Image: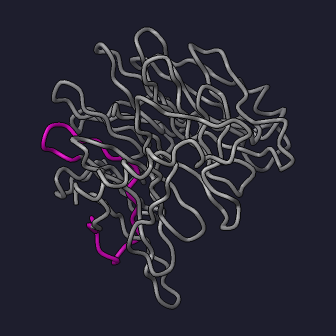
Amino acid sequence: MKEVVLRYIVIAALAVSTVFTSCEKIVLVEVDVYMAGSEGNYAVVWIIGIPHDLPGGTNFAVANSVYVSDYDEYVAGYVNNSIGAANRNIATLWINGEQQNLADNTLSTVATSVFVSGSDVYVTGYVESTSGLAMLWKNGVRQNLKIGGISSEAHSVYISNGDVYVAGNQGKFAVIWKNGEQQNLTDGTNMAVATSVFVSKHDVYVTGYEEYYEEGRETPVSAARLWKNGIIQNLSDREEAFGGSGGSATSVYVSGNDVYVTGIIAYTARLWKNGVVQNLAAADRNIITMSNANSVYVFGNDVYVAGGHGGKFAALWNNGMLHHLTDGSLSPAKANSVFVLKK
């Protein structure tokens, strides 16, 4: 299958100047950009903007995470083949487009993140239920991360110096597991979730959100969070959350001394650089500006953000410039993950 991936790259390189439906053309000279997400009922990988549907899922499928190593393409997500009243997802890993189910359809499961270290492939995920179970697969072998009877989820995995870091939640606690040992990032007063983890120079960065209840309001609102070595940094405060519809931080990437975080506040995609926020929604497009930023990757001086725009379009922001990956004919559509590789 490696030959297929290389062929895709060649085709994409020939078409790169026209694949994005943006007012400005984008030419990627030095890098290949891989993005994973969904369009309509299909799990999709875009390679320099060229879409490739992933097999599986007679009802629907979603790609949540992409990682490329040695030109082998790894994608984590889920497929749904349910018949009748049953509605169960199956955690799935695609390697160069070939489907590998990580679980059966006994329970509904989702794969959320993939990371490759040497010859080892790590995937996080969880069982979707009120008694959910956070899981980590290493080369297809599952490890349960849950402690006790409290529901848990695993959303992101990162490997550094042989240590395995997983971000997620255990009950109301935002947590990180290091080599299976759990560390709570919050005190459990409010519901909180850790969404992404990145390790740089022995520092551990985690993004997520924490929910709050306002007096007289039945539903909670959330505020975006970043933790560095367990110390919290508020990216959006309670007052900002209450004034709109809440916020969350979805992904973190560290480049040199700069810390980049993606997220959403009041239905608007955001990018923080060292705590300073940038609104990524494009005001000049004649569509609903509701948007979400799901993943960030930094290559050299260029910042790539994957997300969705207007509910209809999978999107890439390249240094703040918005490019649509889809034409809006199949919706919803969004990009959940971005990975950049030097040609």
Q: Position of 181 compared to 171: left or right?
A: left
Percent position of residue 130, x then y: 48, 62
Assess whether residue 107 is covered by the magenta stretch.
yes
Percent position of residue 14, x then y: 46, 47
Residue displayed at 51% across by 91% down: 84
Q: Position of 21 compared to 165: left or right?
A: right
What is the residue that sits farthest to the top in this orientation?
257
The answer to which of 117 and 87 lies nearer the viewer is 117
The answer to which of 291 and 194 lies nearer the viewer is 291
Assess whether residue 280 is covered by the magenta stretch.
no
Percent position of residue 307, x then y: 60, 44
Q: Position of 41 compared to 14: left or right?
A: right
Percent position of residue 98, x then y: 27, 66
**What colouring method underlies this structural image?**
one colour
Q: Which region shows up in magenta? A: 100-121
What is the residue that sits farthest to the front in this orientation?
14
Give the answer, above or below, for where 99 lies relative to 118.
below
Residue displayed at 16% across by 57% down: 141
The part of the image, by quadrant, that contains residue 68 is: top left
Residue displayed at 43% across by 18% down: 300
What is the residue that sits farthest to the left in this orientation?
119
Residue displayed at 39% across by 41% down: 156
Looking at the rendered image, the quarter that the C terminus falls into is top left
